[in-house]
Image (cartoon, grey):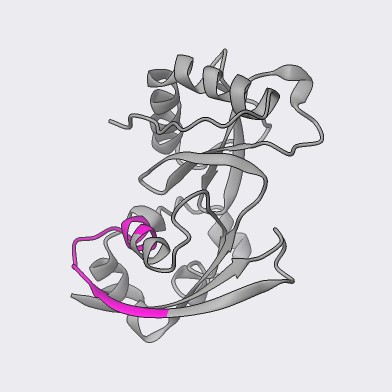
Amino acid sequence: MVKLNFKVYQSLDYTEDNYKVIEYSNEFPDDMALYQVEDLVAEHTKVLIDYIVTKDNIIDITWGKYFSNDIISKMEITIPSEKIKDLDDQFNISHDIIELFVNFPGIGAVVGRTQGITFFFHVDEKDVHQGTPHIHLKYQGEEYRVNLKTISIMDKKDFKNPSKRELALKCIKQNQSDLINYYNKVVINHESCKFKMELK
């Protein structure tokens, strides 16, 4: 078991200027991945539904202890998928505080999460991208958009980890018709709709 200490900054108005702080510590099984632990922390702090971790300090308390941001940006780091016991053995994270900045931006819902990848929709975007059905992804602090019709990345930036990109696109393809239906109902028509992706 690894005891981890969290400080959750829960946004009250979609910014980092107005939030409440929740401190939480607990022991977790050695073989749990960090993203699984974050899900449990979110559940305990009552922010599991429709939340996005917009920023955290996990890089700072791991690789950031030894390398500059320039070097880290060129590395293929998969911290959310790492086992917490391995992270603690290597970086002693149990002696640090893991900070999570949890936001409730204008989203219809977080519709899925797997291996550190969060799938979600914005419903208050000023630009709906000329009506192109799309879904947002968040992985390791970076946000991406995927065209739901072509199952392709809409942004110039791409996943640094090709295997995560392939996993994300595979999950979207498996749920394509349901995701387009959700987009039309929630993003375009602002209707209420419950849906969770099947992630295999």
Answer whether residue 47 is magenta in the image.
Answer: no
Q: Is residue 124 visible?
A: yes
Residue 130, picture quadrant: top right
Q: Nearer the viewer, residue 198 or 1?
A: 198
The quadrant of the rendering that contains the N terminus is bottom left
Q: How many marks?
A: 0
* Side of 161 relative to 90 (left or right): right
The residue segment tinted magenta is 24-39
Q: Residue at x 66, y 50 (%)?
A: 105
Where does the image place residue 38, in percent across and percent down from the top left? 39, 62
Q: Is residue 92 visible?
A: no
Residue sticking out furthest to the bottom: 95
Q: Residue at x 42, y 83 (%)?
A: 96
Question: Does residue 82 sit above or below 130 in this rendering?
Answer: below
* Side of 47 relative to 11 (left or right): left
Q: Nearer the viewer, residue 8 or 34?
A: 8
Where does the image place residue 163, in percent across and percent down from the top left? 39, 35
Question: Does residue 43 sit above or below 181 in this rendering?
Answer: below
Where does the image place residue 15, in percent across and percent down from the top left? 72, 62
Residue 4, picture quadrant: bottom left
Answer whether residue 33 is magenta in the image.
Answer: yes
Q: Residue at x 30, y 75 (%)?
A: 88
Where does the image place residue 24, in percent across and percent down from the top left? 40, 79
Q: Residue at x 52, y 30 (%)?
A: 193
The quadrant of the rendering that contains the C terminus is top left
Residue sticking out furthest to the right: 126
